[in-house]
Amino acid sequence: SLKGPILQPHRHSIPPPFVCGSFSGTCSTLLFQPLDLVKTRLQTSQSGMQPGSSRVGMTSVLLGVVRTERLLGLWKGASPSFVRTIPGVGIYFSSYHSLKQHFFQDSRPGAAQAVMLGGGARTVAGVVMLPITVIKTRFECGRYSYVSVSGALRSVCRSEGPAALFSGLMATLLRDVPFSGIYVMFYSQTKASLPLSPSAPVANFSCGVLSGVLASLVTQPADVVKTHVQVNPQLRTTEAVRHIYTAHGLQGFFRGAVPRCLRRTMMAAMAWTVYEQMMAHVGLKS
């Protein structure tokens, strides 16, 4: 009979949450990569500044990049961003979906459970994709003359050893796990309290923007430390914290907050909106 194989075409295919997550991540990365580049330049520029010197703003960095590297220079680091985002967001949403199905198949997770769901999914994706994150940060900072992602990986392994690809692991997890946990908590709780249909794209996006702003501000200091460690792998996390505080005070930990907040908020809001619409389209509960 021909019915058996025809009725089960997806048994060995890529899981729908992975496909939906990867597609949503691709869309958001393409749109918001310039903000990530500006954020990285702002954070790395402060390491060469003398205490008390005039600050470089977001607008001047943006114009400086366009002037010296042309408009396409704003998408420098896009290739490692895509290499990281396409599987990374797919892994994140697959992990999130699996954890949710396993622990909360018949119930809505509360605030604490939502934090654990988001944090657990981000831990898996963050550790797996960290080497590409390191390469992406170095591409964007403008200090390294890498030509391709594969060439950059070979160069780092040859000159610094494979361990350098996992530099900033602690700072990355301290940034991404709380961000994802806080984001999922605010997102799920805000959606549950809305009078609108919780599956409406406008509702999803609005909840995503609010959640992204709050989560970005809470985790900004860890992002600054992570950038310093990955650009200067000889720095330990504690040394980076001490250096930033000594040179720039508490405000140094919020360097690049505006472009990061804009980018993380819009990327997360778009990623979750596209993911939930695609999951609904294929008939799966997100």
Image (tube, grey):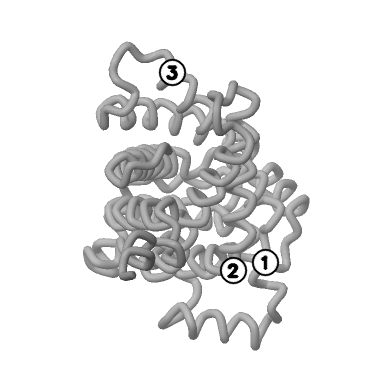
Q: Secondary structure at mark 3?
A: helix
Disc 2: which residue: 131
Measured from the top left, where is residue 156 in percent x and y? 61, 80
**What's the amino acid at mark 3?**
Ala
The relative height of residue 19 versus residue 255 in the rendered view (above or below) is: below
Separation of residues labelled 3 and 1 (CA atoms): 38 Å
Disc 3: which residue: 192
Q: Quadrant of residue 174?
A: top right
The relative height of residue 189 versus residue 154 in the rendered view (above or below) is: above
Q: Secondary structure at mark 2?
A: helix
Asked whether disc 3 touches disc 1, contact meaning CB atoms under 8 Å apart, the reply is no
Observer able to see residue 160: yes
Measured from the top left, where is residue 218 in percent x and y? 57, 31
Residue, far left: 71
Asked whether disc 1 touches disc 2, contact meaning CB atoms under 8 Å apart, the reply is yes
- Say few, some or many: other residues with alpha carbon within 10 Å of mark 3 (under 14 / 14 to 19 / 20 or more): some
Residue, far front: 1
